[in-house]
Image (tube, rainbow, N blue to C red):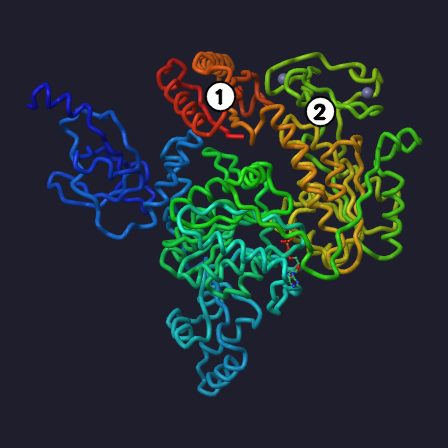
Amino acid sequence: MPSDRGRRKLLEAIYAQVILDITSGNLDRTFQYRIPARLQGQIRPGTQVIVPLGKSNRPVTAFVLELEDKPACDPIKIKEISDLSHDAEPVESQLIELAFWMKRRYGAAMIQCLKTVLPVARKVRAVEKKEIFRKAAPAEYEVFLEECRRKHQKARVRLLEAIPADGPVPYELVGQKLHVASGVVRSLEQKGMIQVQARQVLRNPFSRKKQEKQVLQLNSVQQEAVSQLLEEMHCQGRKRPCLLYGITGSGKTLVYMELIEEIRRQGKQAIVLIPEIALTYQTVMRFYNRFGDRVSFINSRLSAGERYDQFLRAKKGELDVMIGPRSAVFTPFPDLGLIIVDEEHESAYKSETTPRYHARDAAIARASMCGGMVVLGSATPSMESAWQAARKQFRLVTMDRRAREDAVLPSVHVVDMRQEMLAGNKTMFSRVLYEKLKERLEKKEQSMLFLNRRGYSSFVSCRSCGEAVRCPHCDVTLTLHRNQQLKCHYCGYTVPMVKTCPSCGSPYVAGFGTGTQKVEEKLRELFPEARILRMDMDTTRGKNGHESIISAFANEEADILVGTQMIVKGHDFGKVTLVGALAADTSLYTSDFRACERTFQLLTQAAGRAGRSGLPGEMVVQTYKPENYSIQTAASQNYGAFYREEIHYRKMMNYPPCSCMAKIIFSSPSEENAAETAKETAAALRRRLHADTGQVLGPSAAEIGKINDIFYYNLFLRTADREQMNQELEFINSFMEWTKCRKDVMIQFDIL
Ligand code: ADP
Ligand code: ZN
Ligand code: ZN
């Protein structure tokens, strides 16, 4: 038995939670060890250590997940870490460190973060998930096939004939249909005729024929951007993240590829993040054409097993470049040198499930851990990134010219829908838009019309003056509930539905919103001869619904494409010369402080879709708020002017990026428990915070107050900076631990 003093010493020791095996998928099994004094200060999350295991105390390697100051059981029973592992640091160390960063930053449990960050092996029926390509040059392939025919090697001939010149065949064909033994496949692979690889699930049939083969030379603007970015890359010590602000069509992809080339020369690897919706066959082919089979990609259609296969290839050094949506940031490259975040402003980079991480932030955190560099690219940078650039925390690199000589920026017409109403036009198409649509139909050019569906129908606005009904305390619009109550989702302010407009007294106030279906109907009435395609949640439900509509439109099987904002993201249609935003301002009325930012981004990106190839493009923006700066600056494609207005507003209202805000979500099957816990937490936070260090807003019922019989309550927390936010999240977590009386209440954090 240790003496009292010895016992106290044990209680004061530092402990480490370690995990022994992280590839088996059994991430929940962790063990606590004591850190001996001689190793203190050398151990942090991610460190690989040697620990004694089992009765025989056999030494095994383990990863440290977290440091703890409390023993989980009787301290005498806790064993000591034997030593640091002296192997080269494996990539898992870095990923665990990243998981730990995530835990602190987003207030989630370590286990959830580990599961998000670490690739976990799943049993895959590998045979079904592969496909076979021709690998040899066409002439060589034909000669070889002829020889096999001559030698009557029937199995070889069957297989070689079955693989088309321009695409893969599924591996399962080999056994089921062709009766070719796997040994035959292997021998042909060894001879370099064919190649077997994990199936690439990405297909975008229309763009297959449109891929560009010639190698493009950097123009002078791109050249200048590249040399500035390389300067940062070669900088010793801490590299600043770079914001590559390049207008639509300025040729950012070519710049990315130059940087990747350099990273490869250094023997390192690169990750390219692209929002899923823009991750088309066309985009991926541009990288394949340049880097060949050293590139791979993942997307959400891959199964967990297929994704794991790709990650394993990355870990084994078979790849230099990984392309993918937000989760590709966790690719286990052993020597990662560069992370590119294309379209960095896209909200799809933020996870909707806990931990609600933002891939841009994860990229920056990961790069700083491995001494790599981050490049954020966009034509409409997020306020966060632009603010960091303005404060010199990020390095700003600008490209302000379209790369193709024949591509000009479209001209934009803003139409005031209030004037249309005054002039007796009660349809959803302004007179200008109608005329321009007619013109396009006559000239056999294509048009795209989109409805901005954010905040659809949930806010109340006035048809006469265009004002929406707002919260007097929060500067967001009130949300109309089915019980005819108008409610603020930030502070809980509630009033009965108004009968007349609070701004002008007009009786024409109503919930706002038109569906895409209605747009299609009206178009058919106006232009019975037009061929119209509609793309929205209803028409894309089938597995390939989305792609078949896109390819039909790209093949010019329709004159007009109607849809939600998804149609203007990431697709290039050469023949489109008119883009119409039917209700440009619906996104201005959401209960979100990013409303103007989203509106500006959407309209600017949409305008960038028109006139991509020689034909001049036009855009018509229909709005009740023509004077709003996000609409004005989008119309003049003036990012700088937008930024200045918006940052002024954020500063005035103390919204991010000028402060740090989090939504704290309480949920419970008991409405009372959720509400009470939210209230108690709010009170506890208010006692801790002083007016200058932070504020608590709410609690109030969530926008959708009940889902599946679970009730939701929200609390908003504002702090001056990240570090303080991290501390408050930690406090809330331990506060929830202490007040265990309401066990059925779950808590989630959403950093805004
Ligand atoms: P964005 O900056 O909008 O991502 P892209 O990288 O998609 O722009 O390039 C826009 C178009 O310009 C593409 O069709 C691309 O092939 C072309 N392009 C890019 N760089 C050059 C160049 N140096 N010379 C000629 N065309 C280029
Ligand atoms: Zn009014
Ligand atoms: Zn309010």
Question: At which x and y percent is residue 344?
Answer: 57, 44
In-image side of 440 versus 263 (left or right)? right
The amino acid beneath tag 1 is: Phe
First reached walking from the N terminus: tag 1 or tag 2:
2
- Read off the residue under disc 2: 459
Q: Residue at x 85, y 24 (%)?
A: 464
- Read off the residue under disc 1: 666
Q: Which numbered marker is on residue 183?
A: none
In-image side of 369 versus 35 (left or right)? right
Q: Disc 1 on helix, strand or loop? A: strand
Q: Residue at x 50, y 19 (%)?
A: 694
Distance from mark 2 CB to nearest ligand 3 atom below 8 Å: no
Q: Residue furthest right?
A: 423
Q: Name the image quarter holding residue 700.
A: top right
Ligand 2 in which quarter: top right
Q: Residue at x 33, y 39 (%)?
A: 27
Question: At which x and y percent is residue 355?
Answer: 45, 34
The amino acid beneath tag 2 is: Phe
Q: Residues within 10 Å of mark 2 (few under 14, many from 20)?
A: many
In this rendered view, identify the residue nearer to me: 66 or 710: 66
Q: Residue at x 44, y 31 (%)?
A: 106
